[in-house]
Amino acid sequence: MNRDQMLTFLKNEAKGIAAMFGPNCETLVHDMTRHGHPILAIYNGSVTGRDVGSTADIFGDIGDYDETVYEKKDYVNQLVLSRDGRTFKSSTFNIVGPDYHFALGINMDITHMVRATQMLSEMTATSGDLQQTLMQDARSQLEEMLRECVSAVGKEPAAMKKTDRMRVIRMLYKRRAFTYQKSVAIVSEQLGVSRYTIYKYMHELEEAEAAGSIVDDN
């Protein structure tokens, strides 16, 4: 493919890409063999305000940058922050032949999409997981209730006998503490006994209540 054929091909490619992705997508073909890399073809040029023949790069610089950096490699899907505060995604592809060196540029203005993404992120942000928060609050309430009951008995759990633990369980039972999620696990952990023991105490209390023999703690 000679120079003219390649240029025609790249123009068609650039035009098609611009049409496919819409007015916020600028595509262009540079002549990389000439100083300033002048634009040979451009579509949706209003995105950066450039025309055919312009030597300005996407940042708006003309001649005051090292233009050789664009000749050495392709730059794909790069972030660009323009002088006027807009945000772009930019790619540059080099096409080199025996008598030509072109570059196909694709610049997508994503300023509004970035702002929309930020807005959606703010709108969908939460301060916590409600289920986890409720569970933590319930645990805190249960632990506070348990501390009050232990204080009423007047002994630390490690020094308690069965009768003392039964008093604690009875007070918790009367306060409906065992309706909290994972309450048995929490109480057994705090009292230093097994879950089976807590269930056993509760069963004994239920039998005593059914028999009318539970004595209220003052």
Image (cartoon, helix red, strand yellow):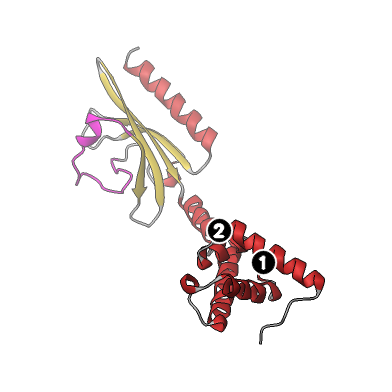
Q: Earlier in the sequence, mark 2 or mark 1?
A: 1
Which stretch did the figure color magenta? 55-75
Q: Which residue is depicted at the point 36% across and 18% down?
A: 6
* Label number found at residue 178: 1
- Give left or right: position of 202 versus 69: right
Return the residue found at the far right: 211
Could you tell me which secondary element the residue under label 2 belongs to? loop
Task: Point out the residue furthest to the bottom here.
Answer: 218
Which amino acid type corresponds to the residue marked 2 in the rendered image?
Ser
Give x and y (percent) for residue 106. Answer: 40, 36
In the displayed structure, would residue 100 be above or below residue 63? above
Q: Residue at x 51, y 42 (%)?
A: 23
Per the image, the residue denoted by label 2 is 194
Please tell me how crowded label 2 is: few (under 14), some (14-19), or many (20+) other residues with Cα within 10 Å: some
Q: Secondary structure at mark 1?
A: helix
Give percent across and percent down for residue 153. Answer: 56, 81
Q: Nearer the viewer, residue 14 or 186?
A: 186
